[in-house]
Image (cartoon, rainbow, N blue to C red):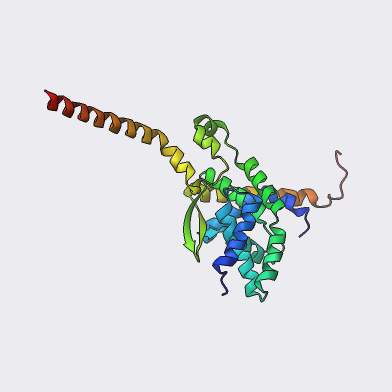
Amino acid sequence: MEKLTPSQLERIYIHLLAASPDNVLQEELLDHLACEVEHLINAGQPFEKAWSEVSGEASIISVRCLKKRYQNELTLSGERLQQADLTELVFEYRNKAYGAYPLRQAYPTHIVNALLAGTGIFIILLAGLTLLTS
Amino acid sequence: MESSSYEFLRGTLKTIVLKLLAEQGRMYGYQITQSVKERTGGEILLTFGALYPVLHKLEQEGMLVTESEEVEGRLRKYYSVTPLGSQTADEKVSEFERFVGLMRILLQSPPDVALGQ
């Protein structure tokens, strides 16, 4: 079984990024297209030929078309929409695994923790200072 | 397969995917397209554009669960059915078989009797 090299994988990834930079399906599509290319390579084609065939089918237009269909299919509705917060709405069709989503989700907790810690340290310092001066 | 058949496929895609996953256990996207292709002798080709929205929709509805694994330096997402999903697969398949039966009756040339007499 022939496997793609990291630089060949990167070419597929760049193609997908060009089609839609924040696609929620990015990782899955990368694996899917890589599997298709490997399939053709195992059937005896060189990488360049295999990739040009696969990228012809997975053109920038068809990837964008997929994104649109995905959005139609998975739009938040009904109860889920009622319960969704701003972060949920902003990241509805975006790549949640990238990192910004968990950061935003944890933001309220971070604020409360920081406020409590800040107040605590301030009170301790103030108490220490009062003890020293008295 | 004729491109017009895609119209028929669209309504049955959920059934196909659920049934396949209920039978085979864990599969990833490309594997599903290959399995459908092999079973139908290359007649039905699922495109990634049709498949992934359905998979994610089924996951959202609680019919499928996913697990990601790193394979050969890339992330591979495996899907498998939940109990709800496998129950739905059975229901959908029997519903669809009933529908196919009815369609067959409809499409047969009518028996040689005068109607309404």
Q: Is residue B32 something one can see in this rendering?
A: no
Which residue is rendered at x = 68% and y = 48% of the image? A64
Figure label count: 0
- Residue B96: image location, x then y, percent: 65, 49
Residue closer to the observer: A69 or A102: A102
Instruction: Tell me if A100 is positioned left or right of B19 in this view.
Output: left
Residue closer to the observer: A129 or A52: A129
Residue closer to the observer: B22 or B56: B56
Instruction: Tell me if A74 is positioned left or right of A127 in this view.
Output: right
Establish if A34 lies above or below A128.
below
Which residue is rendered at x = 71% and y = 59% of the image? A57
- Residue B85: image location, x then y, percent: 52, 49
Instruction: Tell me if A65 is positioned left or right of A8 in this view.
Output: right
- Residue A113: image location, x then y, percent: 32, 34
- Residue A127: image location, x then y, percent: 18, 26
Quadrant location, the C terminus of chain A:
top left
